[in-house]
Amino acid sequence: MGANTLTVTDNRTGKTIEIPIENDTFDPMPVRQMKVNADDFGMMSYDPSYRNTASCKSKITFIDGDKGILLYRGYPIEQLAEKSTYLEVAYLLLFGELPNKKQLDDWVFQITHHRMIHETIRGFIDGFHHDAHPMGMLISSLAAMSTFYPEAKQIHDPEVRKMQIYRLIAKIPTLAAFSYRHSFGLPYSYPDDELSYAGNFLNMLFKMNELKYKVNPVLEKAMDVLFILHADHEQNCSSTTMRTVGSAHADPYSSMAAAAAALYGPLHGGANEEVLRMLRQIGSKDKIPEYIKRVKAGEVLLMGFGHRVYKNYDPRAKIIKNIAEQVFEVTGKNPLLEMAIELERIALQDDYFVKRKLYPNVDFYSGIIYEAMKFPAEIFTVLFAIGRTSGWLAQWQELLTDPEQKISRPRQVYLGPSTRDFVPMDKRK
Ligand code: SDX
């Protein structure tokens, strides 16, 4: 094998440079010296939407898109979904190792006892219109939280960071549940510290006048596993947003409000809500071929299919499909599931999708389970945000402690007009 370098020749000038290869990547800065004229700016790499650009070094999550592999700190997602809990996985993502008994007990104690939100934040949620989208309420409430914890700006203090991490993981289910209750004109159901993370979330969503909410263990486990599956996914759009805003040294509440805003997009976390809308729009199994035709004509997307990285079945979709069976034992079959299974069967045989390596992603089945659990479609992305909170915070913390990271500030290829003089109004066309 030759030298561990890349040889780059600018054929315009014949100039050649050697760039060291590290981790199968190269630093593009040296090509800045490649110029035709002495006063040229020099060359840059151009990679819109970062299709082939590593923005950071990370030890948190590994994805092999071709093999459909997903590891959190080296542990396969399938093992964590089966054997762990969401709070244990959150600890793993944030601190790098599975906690011992004492570490886990302390961690769960802290998260459990930070679930309440300041009553004034409740006032924010009360102020939204009755039909405000829960994601709009969540994004705003997260940003508002930065005004309650000004010390959070001390982002270089590990103890201050840890306290904000406790608060955000603990309070985001409360914010989500209060937004949900507000949308339905229901009184808020406050946290019950005797219940698990997922159990308490269901309690805050669905408790009515009974003295104590009775958690269904199957739905509690399904919710906890869904949080695990959504916990992190390396440099996805919302985690990149968390890192970008965090790189400016904004506080974690403001950074996470930005990340949640990115997740709200229908191409990202908003896809699960769109899958339900698509299935309803198709209407019945016999209408699927007609919809597939529209997809192939480029008129519509097959929501819940395709992925920037996975060019194989999303391992999370496989696990979610198994959870669906357990949930439907409790909630009863969901006709949309039959349609989704038929849509998947047809798509996986169709050359249009096979050629483009379009497989079901995490969003394809999650929406159907959420609907069976009586969640309205508008809250699906909020459920995604709850799980992803630990991943966003782990990526944020890794960014702040990485000596190679600075404020994110990409360059551009300028194709606009060159210098020209101002045109007075009477001279304009
Ligand atoms: C998530 O990054 C992450 O990790 C995200 C996520 C996470 O955990 O954070 O995994 C969660 O966001 C999952 C994705 C949810 N989004 C959707 O389900 C929306 C529908 N999917 C598409 O919008 C799309 O697949 C993306 C946005 C997910 C990926 O977009 P890319 O990278 O542009 O897709 P591609 O380049 O691989 O597409 C290749 C071809 C293109 O067609 P051609 O130009 O080659 O003819 O496939 C087409 C695309 O137009 N295509 C689709 C399609 N997805 C891609 N055609 C129809 N339906 C689709 N869903």
Image (cartoon, rainbow, N blue to C red):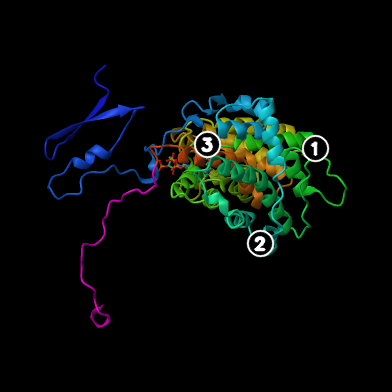
Q: Is residue 311 above or below residue 249?
A: above
Which is the main secondary structure of the residues drawn in magenta?
A: loop
Between circles 2 and 3, the one closer to the viewer is: 2
Mark in the foreground, 1 or 2: 2
In this rendering, position of residue 150 left or right of residue 245: right
The circle drawn on residue 206 is: none
Q: Is residue 248 visible?
A: yes
**Which residue type does callout 3 highlight?**
His
Which residue does the image show at 54% across and 48% down from the upper left? 252
Query: Which residue: 40% across, 37% down?
Result: 403
Q: Which residue is mark 1?
A: 216
Disc 2 marks which amino acid? Answer: Phe
Distance between the alpha carbons at the discs numbered 1 and 2: 31 Å
**Crowding at mark 3 (Cα within 10 Å: few <14, some 14-19, many 20+):** many
Q: Residue at x 27, y 39 (%)?
A: 29
Q: Which residue is mark 3?
A: 233
Ligand 1 has an atom within 8 Å of the beta carbon of the residue at disc 3: yes
| C-alpha gap between disc 2 and disc 3 | 31 Å
Label pair 2/3, CB-CB below 8 angstroms: no
Left/right placement of residue 315 relative to residue 121 reads left
| Disc 1 and disc 2 in contact, CB within 8 angstroms | no
Q: Position of residue 366 (x, y in %)?
A: 64, 40
* Range covered by the magenta-colored residues: 406-429
In primary-sequence order, the first of circles 1 and 2 is: 2
Of residues 425 and 74, the one nearer the viewer is 74
- Which residue has dot 2 on it? 124
301 w.r.t. 20: above or below: below
Q: Earlier in the sequence, mark 1 or mark 3?
A: 1
- What residue do we see at 57% from left, 56% from top? 143
Secondary structure category for the residue under label 2: helix
Q: Are marks 1 and 3 in contact (CB under 8 Å)?
A: no
